Image (cartoon, grey):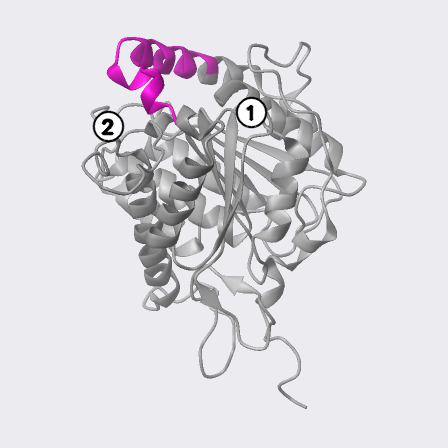
Amino acid sequence: PGLSRAPRGVARGGEMRRGFLGAAPPKRAETPPEPRGDPEDGLGFDRAFERALLAQEDRRAHREASSSLSDETTLGVTLRSSAANAASLDGALTRHWPHGHVIVPSADGHADNLMLMLHGRGDVPAPFAKLARSMALPRTCCVALQGPHPIPFVDDGRAWFTFMDQESFEPIDGSDPSDTRRVDSLDRVVTRLANLIDALTDAHSTAHSTAAPTPTWPRSRVHLFGFSDGGTVALTVAMRAHKEGKGRLGGCATVCAALLSEQIRTLHEEGDDGSSGDDGSSGAPTPVTLTAGESDRVVSVSSVRETAEVLIDVNPGHVASVHAVPGKGHAMVGGERGEGEMRHLMGFWSLTL
């Protein structure tokens, strides 16, 4: 009887099962209309953020126009109407991410962009796949990935990294600097996800294969979207890609997610000794937007804001914004307060997809 309930800390991603708010897809060639509203009132974008993001997108478009990567054969467009290539993508995902996934093809038949969706702790990919169908983002193939770790006493629910002691089931809160279990586990899953992205962005990896070639995308066309722990993974993947000089991804959007306290502490320490500053050699970092619930008791809005601040501090010029939702707790987009949050996310994607 004592083992019939989930251990403490498991519910971090469980709110996702409540469902989602459908929203009209953004128009590819248009940006959200003015006025934006005050950035402090939880409505719209900070104008400085939008200007920085648009400038970054202009630079990306210019590079793509002058690069061979802008060729039609490398934009993932072979996935538009080919069942064989869709099956090939499924095979590539199974090889490089054997933990499970759900593919949601673009509703308009084009796949210029790829969005990897990462669920919260204790959840599965199906609700995110449902959200992808509801959003119907233009020219975008969505893949909802499943976390690699099963959770004790939770049917089907998965986790992305270690979050509790295996013997006592007590949550790991990151307060002990000598306890690296959580961040080490995060590092391992980020490595695996980065390898998956490498496989899906290397146009030459299957060029000589006898099997159907895997559709590939430029890195700047790969987007990340994560909730709770899945958002922590997404932020870390984007941050590491820039640090390793692999080039920016298309964008990273998170809901109720922040970097771990261990990561923030390390980044502050590196900043203090001058070892983490960006010298510009890696190019522009991946643009990031984070939404947060002002009543979230799992991932506080202050930790979300601190995450955005540290990303900017480590990489001056980094594009990162926070959208706080009054009265919202730890939950995915949806419910009575979800309309403004979804509008914010759609605005971000209208500028980055």
Per the image, the residue denoted by label 1 is: 348
Instruction: Of the two numbered discs 1 and 2 on the same chain, state the one appearing first in sequence.
Output: 2
- Magenta range is 54-76
- Whether the magenta-drawn stretch holds residue 252 is answered as no
Q: Which residue lies furthest to the bottom in this view?
A: 1
User: Which three-letter amino acid code belongs to the residue tagged 1?
Assistant: Phe
The residue at which mark 2 appears reads as 282
Please tell me whether residue 331 is drawn above or below residue 348 in the rendered image: below
> What secondary structure is marked by label 2?
loop
In x, y percent, where is residue 54?
47, 13
Asked whether residue 162 is in view, the answer is yes
Q: Nearer the viewer, residue 205 or 169?
A: 205
**Distance between the alpha carbons at the discs numbered 1 and 2:** 23 Å
User: x and y percent of residue 290 in the render?
Assistant: 54, 36
Vertical placement of residue 299 versus 203, above or below: below
Quarter of the figure that contains the N terminus:
bottom right
Q: Residue drawn 68% across and 36% down? A: 134
Q: Quadrant of residue 202?
A: top left
The answer to whether 188 is drawn above or below residue 165 in the figure is above
Position of 8 with respect to 249 (left or right) is: right
Identify the residue at image location x=33%, y=38%: 214
Residue 258 seen in the figure? no
Instruction: Answer whether labels 1 and 2 touch (C-beta < 8 Å).
Output: no
Q: Main secondary structure of the magenta part?
A: helix
Circle number at residue 222: none
Task: Identify which residue, 314 or 197, lies in the foreground.
Answer: 197
Q: Quadrant of residue 327?
A: top right
Q: Indicate yes or no whether the magenta region holds residue 74.
A: yes
User: Is 124 on the left or on the right of 44, as rendered?
Assistant: left
User: Are there few (<14), some (14-19), or many (20+) residues within 10 Å of tag 1?
Assistant: many
Count up the numbered dots.
2
